[in-house]
Amino acid sequence: MSKEIFSFPKEFHWGAATASYQVEGGIENCDWAKAGHEEIVPKAGESSDHYNRFLEDFDIAKELGHNAHRFSIEWARIEPQEGKFNHDEIEHYRAVLLALRERGIEPYVTLWHFTLPLWFSENGGFERDDAPEKFARYCAFVVRHLGDLCTHFATINEPMVLASLGWIVGEWPPFKRVPSIATLALTDRAHKDDKKPSEKISHFFDYLRVVKNMTKAHNQAYRAIKKEYPDARVSIVKHTVYFHSDGSWWNTLKAKVMNYMWTYRFMNKVIDQMDEIGLNYYQHKKYGDTREYDYTDMGWQIYPEGIEGAIMLLWHYKKPIVIAEAGIADHTDEKRGDYIKKQIQGVARAMSLGADVRGHMYWSLLDNFEWALGYEKRFGLVAIDYETKERTVRPSAHMYKEIIARSSISLTN
Ligand code: BGC
Protein backbone atom coordinates (compact mmCIF):
# COMPACT_ATOMS: atom_id res chain seq x y z
CA MET A 1 0.00 0.00 0.00
CA SER A 2 1.43 3.40 -0.93
CA LYS A 3 2.00 5.87 1.87
CA GLU A 4 0.14 9.15 1.98
CA ILE A 5 2.45 12.07 1.25
CA PHE A 6 1.93 15.52 2.74
CA SER A 7 3.26 18.57 0.89
CA PHE A 8 4.08 21.68 2.92
CA PRO A 9 2.92 25.05 1.56
CA LYS A 10 5.49 26.96 -0.53
CA GLU A 11 5.74 29.77 2.02
CA PHE A 12 6.40 27.38 4.95
CA HIS A 13 9.28 28.52 7.17
CA TRP A 14 12.03 25.98 7.71
CA GLY A 15 14.88 26.71 10.05
CA ALA A 16 16.45 26.41 13.46
CA ALA A 17 16.55 28.41 16.68
CA THR A 18 19.09 29.76 19.16
CA ALA A 19 18.92 32.02 22.22
CA SER A 20 21.32 34.81 23.12
CA TYR A 21 22.77 33.62 26.43
CA GLN A 22 23.09 30.07 25.12
CA VAL A 23 25.30 30.91 22.13
CA GLU A 24 26.49 34.52 22.00
CA GLY A 25 29.18 34.58 24.68
CA GLY A 26 30.40 37.60 26.65
CA ILE A 27 27.18 38.38 28.56
CA GLU A 28 28.17 39.22 32.13
CA ASN A 29 25.46 41.54 33.44
CA CYS A 30 22.51 39.17 33.82
CA ASP A 31 21.16 36.93 36.58
CA TRP A 32 22.57 33.73 35.03
CA ALA A 33 26.07 35.20 34.70
CA LYS A 34 25.95 36.26 38.35
CA ALA A 35 24.83 32.79 39.43
CA GLY A 36 27.65 31.39 37.28
CA HIS A 37 30.22 33.53 39.06
CA GLU A 38 28.80 32.41 42.38
CA GLU A 39 29.21 28.83 41.14
CA ILE A 40 25.57 27.93 41.65
CA VAL A 41 25.23 27.12 37.93
CA PRO A 42 27.89 26.67 35.22
CA LYS A 43 29.32 29.75 33.51
CA ALA A 44 28.38 30.44 29.90
CA GLY A 45 31.61 32.39 29.28
CA GLU A 46 32.53 32.78 25.62
CA SER A 47 30.08 30.11 24.52
CA SER A 48 30.28 29.51 20.76
CA ASP A 49 31.02 33.23 20.21
CA HIS A 50 27.99 33.53 17.97
CA TYR A 51 27.95 37.25 18.84
CA ASN A 52 31.02 37.69 16.63
CA ARG A 53 30.52 34.75 14.28
CA PHE A 54 26.89 35.13 13.27
CA LEU A 55 27.79 35.69 9.60
CA GLU A 56 29.55 32.34 9.41
CA ASP A 57 26.68 30.68 11.26
CA PHE A 58 24.04 32.14 8.95
CA ASP A 59 26.06 31.04 5.92
CA ILE A 60 25.81 27.52 7.30
CA ALA A 61 22.04 27.91 7.89
CA LYS A 62 21.59 29.09 4.31
CA GLU A 63 23.72 26.26 2.98
CA LEU A 64 21.46 23.88 4.94
CA GLY A 65 18.42 25.21 3.09
CA HIS A 66 16.93 27.23 5.95
CA ASN A 67 14.61 30.09 5.01
CA ALA A 68 13.83 31.14 8.59
CA HIS A 69 15.73 31.54 11.85
CA ARG A 70 14.68 32.21 15.43
CA PHE A 71 17.03 33.99 17.81
CA SER A 72 16.70 36.12 20.92
CA ILE A 73 17.75 39.59 21.93
CA GLU A 74 19.64 39.92 25.21
CA TRP A 75 17.74 42.37 27.42
CA ALA A 76 20.86 43.00 29.54
CA ARG A 77 22.76 44.17 26.45
CA ILE A 78 20.00 46.53 25.30
CA GLU A 79 19.11 47.96 28.72
CA PRO A 80 22.20 47.41 30.91
CA GLN A 81 20.93 49.95 33.44
CA GLU A 82 17.36 50.75 34.23
CA GLY A 83 15.97 53.07 31.56
CA LYS A 84 19.39 53.49 29.84
CA PHE A 85 19.41 51.91 26.41
CA ASN A 86 22.52 50.93 24.50
CA HIS A 87 22.29 51.97 20.86
CA ASP A 88 25.49 50.12 19.88
CA GLU A 89 23.80 46.87 20.84
CA ILE A 90 20.76 47.82 18.80
CA GLU A 91 23.16 48.30 15.88
CA HIS A 92 24.56 44.84 16.54
CA TYR A 93 21.13 43.23 16.33
CA ARG A 94 20.32 45.29 13.23
CA ALA A 95 23.42 43.78 11.63
CA VAL A 96 22.21 40.31 12.67
CA LEU A 97 18.80 40.94 11.10
CA LEU A 98 20.33 42.37 7.93
CA ALA A 99 22.61 39.35 7.62
CA LEU A 100 19.56 37.08 7.78
CA ARG A 101 17.62 39.18 5.29
CA GLU A 102 20.57 39.22 2.86
CA ARG A 103 20.55 35.43 2.93
CA GLY A 104 16.80 35.22 2.32
CA ILE A 105 16.18 33.98 5.87
CA GLU A 106 13.04 35.22 7.64
CA PRO A 107 13.83 36.29 11.22
CA TYR A 108 11.79 35.36 14.27
CA VAL A 109 12.91 37.48 17.21
CA THR A 110 12.34 36.46 20.81
CA LEU A 111 12.53 39.50 23.05
CA TRP A 112 13.25 37.58 26.22
CA HIS A 113 14.65 34.07 26.57
CA PHE A 114 15.09 33.51 30.33
CA THR A 115 18.01 35.83 31.28
CA LEU A 116 17.33 39.09 33.12
CA PRO A 117 19.42 42.25 33.46
CA LEU A 118 20.85 42.52 36.97
CA TRP A 119 19.15 45.82 37.76
CA PHE A 120 15.85 44.03 37.21
CA SER A 121 16.53 40.62 38.78
CA GLU A 122 18.19 42.13 41.86
CA ASN A 123 15.15 44.24 42.57
CA GLY A 124 12.68 41.39 42.54
CA GLY A 125 12.48 40.59 38.81
CA PHE A 126 9.06 39.32 37.82
CA GLU A 127 7.89 39.38 41.42
CA ARG A 128 7.80 43.19 41.19
CA ASP A 129 4.45 44.86 40.64
CA ASP A 130 5.98 47.16 38.04
CA ALA A 131 7.65 44.29 36.14
CA PRO A 132 5.05 44.28 33.32
CA GLU A 133 5.57 47.99 32.74
CA LYS A 134 9.39 47.68 32.67
CA PHE A 135 9.21 44.71 30.36
CA ALA A 136 6.77 46.39 27.97
CA ARG A 137 9.00 49.49 27.82
CA TYR A 138 12.00 47.33 26.81
CA CYS A 139 9.95 45.44 24.19
CA ALA A 140 8.62 48.66 22.68
CA PHE A 141 12.14 50.09 22.47
CA VAL A 142 13.46 47.06 20.61
CA VAL A 143 10.54 46.93 18.19
CA ARG A 144 10.84 50.67 17.53
CA HIS A 145 14.44 50.15 16.41
CA LEU A 146 14.24 46.75 14.74
CA GLY A 147 10.67 46.65 13.46
CA ASP A 148 11.67 47.67 9.93
CA LEU A 149 13.75 44.49 9.65
CA CYS A 150 11.53 41.95 11.38
CA THR A 151 7.85 41.06 11.54
CA HIS A 152 7.70 38.16 14.01
CA PHE A 153 8.26 39.07 17.66
CA ALA A 154 7.79 36.68 20.58
CA THR A 155 7.67 38.40 23.94
CA ILE A 156 8.40 35.58 26.40
CA ASN A 157 9.98 32.17 25.96
CA GLU A 158 8.44 29.38 28.03
CA PRO A 159 6.89 31.30 30.96
CA MET A 160 5.82 28.15 32.83
CA VAL A 161 9.26 26.53 32.57
CA LEU A 162 10.95 29.61 33.94
CA ALA A 163 8.45 30.02 36.78
CA SER A 164 8.57 26.38 37.81
CA LEU A 165 12.34 25.95 37.59
CA GLY A 166 13.00 29.30 39.29
CA TRP A 167 10.34 29.30 42.00
CA ILE A 168 9.16 25.72 42.59
CA VAL A 169 12.06 23.45 41.70
CA GLY A 170 14.68 26.07 42.55
CA GLU A 171 17.29 25.05 39.97
CA TRP A 172 17.29 28.34 38.08
CA PRO A 173 17.62 31.92 39.32
CA PRO A 174 16.35 33.05 41.77
CA PHE A 175 16.72 29.48 43.19
CA LYS A 176 13.55 29.47 45.25
CA ARG A 177 12.17 26.07 45.98
CA VAL A 178 8.83 24.92 47.34
CA PRO A 179 9.49 21.99 49.65
CA SER A 180 7.92 18.57 49.10
CA ILE A 181 5.77 16.97 46.39
CA ALA A 182 5.43 19.90 44.00
CA THR A 183 9.17 19.67 43.50
CA LEU A 184 9.03 15.99 42.65
CA ALA A 185 6.21 16.30 40.15
CA LEU A 186 7.59 18.94 37.83
CA THR A 187 11.05 18.06 36.61
CA ASP A 188 13.89 15.60 36.55
CA ARG A 189 16.61 18.10 35.63
CA ALA A 190 19.68 17.64 37.82
CA HIS A 191 20.85 20.31 40.25
CA LYS A 192 24.00 20.94 42.24
CA ASP A 193 23.80 19.73 45.80
CA ASP A 194 26.57 21.92 47.17
CA LYS A 195 24.63 25.15 46.58
CA LYS A 196 21.13 24.30 47.66
CA PRO A 197 18.20 26.53 46.73
CA SER A 198 16.30 28.09 49.61
CA GLU A 199 13.14 26.20 50.56
CA LYS A 200 9.95 27.88 51.78
CA ILE A 201 6.24 27.32 51.34
CA SER A 202 5.87 31.05 50.64
CA HIS A 203 7.79 30.53 47.38
CA PHE A 204 4.62 29.03 46.00
CA PHE A 205 2.91 32.42 46.37
CA ASP A 206 5.90 34.09 44.70
CA TYR A 207 5.52 31.58 41.88
CA LEU A 208 1.85 32.49 41.44
CA ARG A 209 2.76 36.18 41.42
CA VAL A 210 5.47 35.61 38.81
CA VAL A 211 3.10 33.70 36.52
CA LYS A 212 0.49 36.42 36.91
CA ASN A 213 3.02 39.17 36.24
CA MET A 214 4.28 37.38 33.15
CA THR A 215 0.76 37.23 31.71
CA LYS A 216 0.41 40.94 32.43
CA ALA A 217 3.87 41.62 31.01
CA HIS A 218 2.97 39.90 27.76
CA ASN A 219 -0.37 41.67 27.44
CA GLN A 220 1.18 45.06 28.15
CA ALA A 221 4.10 44.37 25.79
CA TYR A 222 1.66 43.30 23.07
CA ARG A 223 -0.13 46.63 23.24
CA ALA A 224 3.15 48.56 23.34
CA ILE A 225 4.56 46.65 20.36
CA LYS A 226 1.40 47.12 18.31
CA LYS A 227 1.54 50.85 18.99
CA GLU A 228 5.05 50.94 17.51
CA TYR A 229 4.34 48.54 14.68
CA PRO A 230 0.71 47.58 14.05
CA ASP A 231 1.62 44.86 11.52
CA ALA A 232 4.01 43.02 13.84
CA ARG A 233 3.10 39.36 14.38
CA VAL A 234 3.34 38.96 18.13
CA SER A 235 3.43 35.69 20.03
CA ILE A 236 4.41 33.94 23.24
CA VAL A 237 6.52 30.83 22.91
CA LYS A 238 4.78 28.15 24.96
CA HIS A 239 6.52 24.98 26.08
CA THR A 240 3.77 22.44 25.48
CA VAL A 241 4.03 19.11 27.22
CA TYR A 242 1.60 16.71 25.57
CA PHE A 243 -0.24 14.93 28.38
CA HIS A 244 -2.27 11.99 27.10
CA SER A 245 -3.52 8.62 28.30
CA ASP A 246 -4.25 4.97 27.59
CA GLY A 247 -7.93 5.86 27.26
CA SER A 248 -9.16 4.81 30.72
CA TRP A 249 -11.41 7.46 32.28
CA TRP A 250 -9.12 8.07 35.24
CA ASN A 251 -5.97 8.50 33.14
CA THR A 252 -7.85 10.63 30.61
CA LEU A 253 -9.00 12.86 33.43
CA LYS A 254 -5.42 13.17 34.75
CA ALA A 255 -4.17 14.14 31.28
CA LYS A 256 -6.94 16.74 30.94
CA VAL A 257 -6.16 18.30 34.29
CA MET A 258 -2.43 18.45 33.48
CA ASN A 259 -2.99 19.99 30.03
CA TYR A 260 -5.13 22.61 31.71
CA MET A 261 -2.59 23.30 34.48
CA TRP A 262 0.48 23.37 32.22
CA THR A 263 -0.87 24.90 29.01
CA TYR A 264 -4.42 26.22 28.93
CA ARG A 265 -4.47 28.01 32.28
CA PHE A 266 -1.69 30.34 31.15
CA MET A 267 -2.70 30.57 27.49
CA ASN A 268 -6.30 31.50 28.32
CA LYS A 269 -5.00 34.70 29.92
CA VAL A 270 -2.90 35.84 26.96
CA ILE A 271 -4.43 34.37 23.84
CA ASP A 272 -6.45 37.48 22.95
CA GLN A 273 -3.21 39.44 22.70
CA MET A 274 -1.50 37.16 20.22
CA ASP A 275 -1.27 37.03 16.44
CA GLU A 276 0.42 33.65 16.31
CA ILE A 277 1.55 31.04 18.85
CA GLY A 278 5.09 29.77 19.25
CA LEU A 279 5.17 26.12 20.28
CA ASN A 280 8.12 24.34 21.90
CA TYR A 281 7.85 20.57 22.10
CA TYR A 282 10.25 18.23 23.90
CA GLN A 283 8.26 16.05 26.25
CA HIS A 284 5.08 14.08 26.61
CA LYS A 285 3.56 12.15 29.45
CA LYS A 286 1.20 9.28 28.77
CA TYR A 287 -0.75 8.08 31.80
CA GLY A 288 -1.13 4.31 31.82
CA ASP A 289 1.75 3.89 29.39
CA THR A 290 3.27 0.44 29.03
CA ARG A 291 5.60 1.17 26.10
CA GLU A 292 9.40 0.91 26.47
CA TYR A 293 11.17 4.06 25.35
CA ASP A 294 14.62 5.01 24.20
CA TYR A 295 15.95 8.19 25.88
CA THR A 296 17.64 11.41 24.75
CA ASP A 297 20.85 12.61 26.40
CA MET A 298 18.61 14.77 28.60
CA GLY A 299 16.96 11.59 29.90
CA TRP A 300 13.70 12.47 28.15
CA GLN A 301 11.63 9.78 26.43
CA ILE A 302 12.11 9.75 22.67
CA TYR A 303 8.64 10.48 21.36
CA PRO A 304 8.95 13.06 18.56
CA GLU A 305 5.57 12.04 17.11
CA GLY A 306 3.94 13.57 20.21
CA ILE A 307 4.40 16.97 18.58
CA GLU A 308 1.18 16.23 16.70
CA GLY A 309 -0.75 16.10 19.98
CA ALA A 310 1.01 19.22 21.27
CA ILE A 311 0.03 21.13 18.12
CA MET A 312 -3.56 19.94 18.38
CA LEU A 313 -3.69 21.13 22.00
CA LEU A 314 -2.77 24.64 20.88
CA TRP A 315 -4.87 24.49 17.73
CA HIS A 316 -7.80 24.70 20.17
CA TYR A 317 -7.23 28.50 19.89
CA LYS A 318 -7.42 28.50 16.05
CA LYS A 319 -4.48 30.87 15.67
CA PRO A 320 -1.47 30.24 13.39
CA ILE A 321 1.21 28.17 15.09
CA VAL A 322 4.97 28.25 14.55
CA ILE A 323 7.11 25.45 15.92
CA ALA A 324 9.60 27.70 17.70
CA GLU A 325 11.68 24.83 19.13
CA ALA A 326 11.73 21.06 19.02
CA GLY A 327 14.75 18.83 18.99
CA ILE A 328 16.95 16.30 20.70
CA ALA A 329 20.15 16.24 22.74
CA ASP A 330 22.19 13.51 21.06
CA HIS A 331 25.97 13.80 21.24
CA THR A 332 26.50 10.86 18.85
CA ASP A 333 24.08 12.27 16.24
CA GLU A 334 22.84 8.71 15.70
CA LYS A 335 19.26 9.42 16.73
CA ARG A 336 18.81 12.99 15.55
CA GLY A 337 18.04 12.39 11.86
CA ASP A 338 15.25 9.93 12.56
CA TYR A 339 13.97 12.12 15.40
CA ILE A 340 13.69 15.13 13.07
CA LYS A 341 11.92 13.06 10.42
CA LYS A 342 9.34 11.76 12.91
CA GLN A 343 8.88 15.21 14.38
CA ILE A 344 8.15 16.66 10.94
CA GLN A 345 5.78 13.79 10.17
CA GLY A 346 3.93 14.75 13.36
CA VAL A 347 3.73 18.36 12.18
CA ALA A 348 2.45 17.16 8.79
CA ARG A 349 -0.22 14.99 10.42
CA ALA A 350 -1.43 17.91 12.53
CA MET A 351 -1.57 20.09 9.41
CA SER A 352 -3.48 17.44 7.52
CA LEU A 353 -6.00 17.50 10.37
CA GLY A 354 -6.44 21.22 9.75
CA ALA A 355 -3.92 22.92 12.08
CA ASP A 356 -2.46 26.09 10.56
CA VAL A 357 1.26 25.58 11.19
CA ARG A 358 3.47 28.18 9.50
CA GLY A 359 7.00 27.10 10.35
CA HIS A 360 9.35 24.60 11.96
CA MET A 361 12.51 25.70 13.82
CA TYR A 362 14.67 22.84 14.99
CA TRP A 363 16.37 23.37 18.38
CA SER A 364 19.13 24.21 17.92
CA LEU A 365 21.19 25.49 15.03
CA LEU A 366 24.32 25.30 17.19
CA ASP A 367 25.35 23.32 20.24
CA ASN A 368 24.44 25.53 23.16
CA PHE A 369 24.76 26.32 26.85
CA GLU A 370 22.12 24.08 28.37
CA TRP A 371 21.36 26.23 31.41
CA ALA A 372 22.00 24.45 34.75
CA LEU A 373 23.57 21.55 32.82
CA GLY A 374 26.32 23.60 31.16
CA TYR A 375 27.81 22.56 27.81
CA GLU A 376 27.68 18.78 27.90
CA LYS A 377 24.32 18.27 26.16
CA ARG A 378 24.46 18.55 22.39
CA PHE A 379 21.34 19.76 20.61
CA GLY A 380 23.00 21.34 17.55
CA LEU A 381 22.63 20.65 13.87
CA VAL A 382 26.12 22.13 14.00
CA ALA A 383 28.66 20.81 16.52
CA ILE A 384 30.80 23.35 18.35
CA ASP A 385 34.36 22.74 19.50
CA TYR A 386 34.39 25.11 22.49
CA GLU A 387 38.21 25.31 22.52
CA THR A 388 38.71 26.31 18.87
CA LYS A 389 35.15 27.55 18.13
CA GLU A 390 35.24 25.35 15.06
CA ARG A 391 31.85 24.55 13.55
CA THR A 392 31.13 21.06 12.14
CA VAL A 393 27.86 20.32 10.40
CA ARG A 394 26.41 17.06 11.70
CA PRO A 395 25.05 14.44 9.26
CA SER A 396 21.51 14.90 10.64
CA ALA A 397 21.60 18.53 9.45
CA HIS A 398 21.83 17.15 5.91
CA MET A 399 18.89 14.85 6.52
CA TYR A 400 16.88 17.90 7.61
CA LYS A 401 18.12 19.73 4.52
CA GLU A 402 16.78 16.94 2.29
CA ILE A 403 13.33 17.14 3.89
CA ILE A 404 13.36 20.92 3.41
CA ALA A 405 14.35 20.53 -0.24
CA ARG A 406 11.52 18.05 -0.88
CA SER A 407 9.10 20.01 1.30
CA SER A 408 6.99 16.90 1.56
CA ILE A 409 6.93 13.86 3.81
CA SER A 410 5.00 10.63 4.26
CA LEU A 411 2.44 10.89 7.04
CA THR A 412 3.49 7.55 8.49
CA ASN A 413 6.70 5.54 8.54
C1 BGC B 1 14.47 26.20 26.05
C2 BGC B 1 15.89 26.17 25.54
C3 BGC B 1 16.57 24.88 25.97
C4 BGC B 1 15.79 23.72 25.38
C5 BGC B 1 16.37 22.35 25.69
C6 BGC B 1 13.75 24.87 25.95
O1 BGC B 1 13.10 24.62 27.15
O2 BGC B 1 13.76 27.24 25.44
O3 BGC B 1 16.54 27.31 26.04
O4 BGC B 1 17.89 24.83 25.57
O5 BGC B 1 14.50 23.73 25.90
O6 BGC B 1 16.31 22.07 27.05
Image: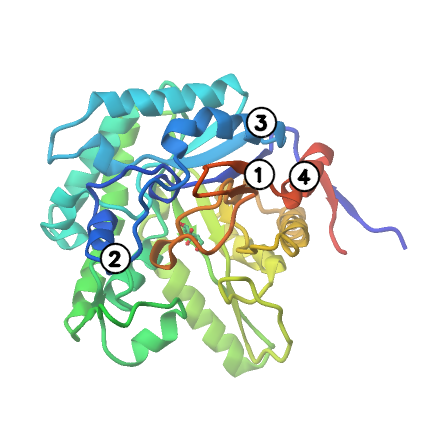
Q: In terms of secondary structure, where does tag 4 sit? A: helix
Q: Earlier in the sequence, mark 2 or mark 4?
A: 2
Q: Residues within 10 Å of mark 4 (few under 14, many from 20)?
A: some
Determine the CA span between mark 3 and mark 1: 15 Å
Q: Residues within 10 Å of mark 1 (few under 14, many from 20)?
A: some
Q: Nearer the viewer, residue 311 or 71?
A: 71
Q: In terms of secondary structure, where does tag 3 sit? A: helix
Determine the CA span between mark 4 and mark 3: 12 Å
Q: Nearer the viewer, residue 128 or 313?
A: 128
Quarter of the N terminus within the rendering: bottom right
Q: In terms of secondary structure, where does tag 2 sit? A: helix
Q: Which numbered disc covers residue 211? A: 2
**Quarter assignment of residue 63:** top right
Q: Which residue is mark 3?
A: 62
Q: Earlier in the sequence, mark 4 or mark 1?
A: 1
Query: Which amino acid is tagged 1?
Result: Thr
Q: Which residue is mark 1?
A: 392
Whether residue 275 is visible: yes
Q: Which residue is mark 4?
A: 398
* Residues tagged 2 and 1 counted as in contact (Cβ below 8 A): no
